Amino acid sequence: MKFIVSSSYLQKHLQLLGGVINNNNTLPILDNFLLELTGNELKVSASDMETTIVSKLEVESQDDGSIALPAKLLLDTLKTFPEQPLTFHSVDTMMTVSHDKGKSEIACAAAEEFPKAVSISEPSSTTIMGDTLATAINKTIFAAGNDDLRPVMSGVFFQFASDSLTFVATDAHKLVRYKREDLSASQTAEFIMPKKPLNLLKAMLQGSESEVLIEYNDSNAQFSFDSTNIICRLIDGKYPNYEAVIPKENPNKLTISRTQFLNSVRRVSIFSNKTTHQIRLKMAGAELNISAEDLDYSNKADERLTCDYQGDDMQIGFNSRFLIEMLNNLTCDDVSLEMSLPNRAGILTPVDGLDEGENVTMLVMPVMLNQ
């Protein structure tokens, strides 16, 4: 098979596909890209058995054929080329790449060895704008857990209903729910998406104005947009009832500038205990006192901020790392923190900066304060 393609166009597409390939694959064939040529359409696939990405590229050719090319070798080679046409020509299992300065030869594998992508039978489907999906992933994925013993918490929970789309992630210490009430699905569905394909989607869809078709059944989901398909296996299991942990009655409400709060927590947390990362928030009147102490090294810090606080005077402890992550993830000017008791979760929500129908709720578990 023989085709001609622009070096930067090919590199741009393969770079994204390369993200799915693991560094240590159990099957050597998974270290390759599968190239399938049909006239002037080149279909490139990459897989790790759980997730498969297929992208269609336009090339100059009249040939048909397929071959598996070593991914790392090809990507490393493409990075070194300035923008120019490259000619790929394969005979048996040898691929020759010719350019204006010379040529290189790459030993390939037979296309038949490459695992076939799963086809989704009788899927349900919904459509969502690419940048909206990227935002939903961005707002939730950081809160997903890394615990192999609780695989259901290591992904993002997609909840589709006829009046809204909801995305949830939690690691039992923090929880984020991102909801779009301006979007809906044709039928109710729930599934848990693993992190890896979501990170790949996020990279591909940032600022994208194309529509994404999501098709899913009980075991797999497929995302199709532009000329790319991502098919992945879903996480098996039942997602915890997250609604039950969101406290309903929160009479104590703090409203404060997000950047001011974030910078203060950042500074004070440097002086917190290195294992608990505990900081103390003390609210009274229109004043918020943020303090931390590391008894092992006799270090401590405290700062006072003016805020709008309604409720009883109270003290509550949080893990500063979780608070910083959440505040960092929001893009609003002001945030509100609602609390009921020092041993109940605090609810962090943006006060402004949301689109119509967009809703973000973040929940952070408190840590016990040693008096």
Image (cartoon, rainbow, N blue to C red):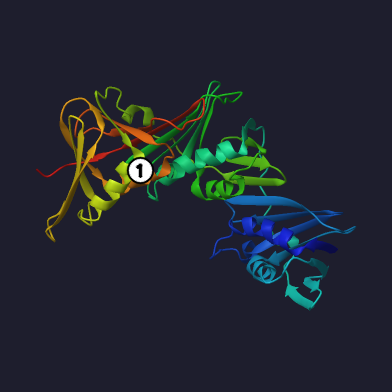
Residue found farthest to the front: 306
Res 86 → quadrant: bottom right
Q: Mark 1 points at which residue?
A: 259
- Left/right placement of residue 178 relative to residue 61 reads left
For the point 17% across and 26% down, the residue is 312
Q: How many marks?
A: 1
Which percent across, then down, holds residue 71? Answer: 65, 65
In the image, residue 63 above or below residue 242: below
Which percent across, then down, holds residue 2? Answer: 85, 64
Q: Which amino acid does the dot numbered 1 rest on?
A: Thr
Which percent across, then down, holds residue 253? Answer: 26, 27
In the image, residue 97 above or below residue 211: below
Res 83 → quadrant: bottom right
Q: Is residue 235 visible?
A: no
Q: Which of 333 and 355 is in front in this view?
A: 333
- Left/right placement of residue 144 relative to residue 185 reads left
Which percent across, then down, holds residue 191? Answer: 51, 35
Q: Can residue 191 be seen in this view?
A: yes
Res 336 → quadrant: top left
Residue found farthest to the left: 371
Sort mark 1 into few (<14), some (14-19) or many (20+) by Cα contacts within 10 Å: some
Q: Nearer the viewer, residue 178 or 38?
A: 178
Secondary structure type for disc 1: helix
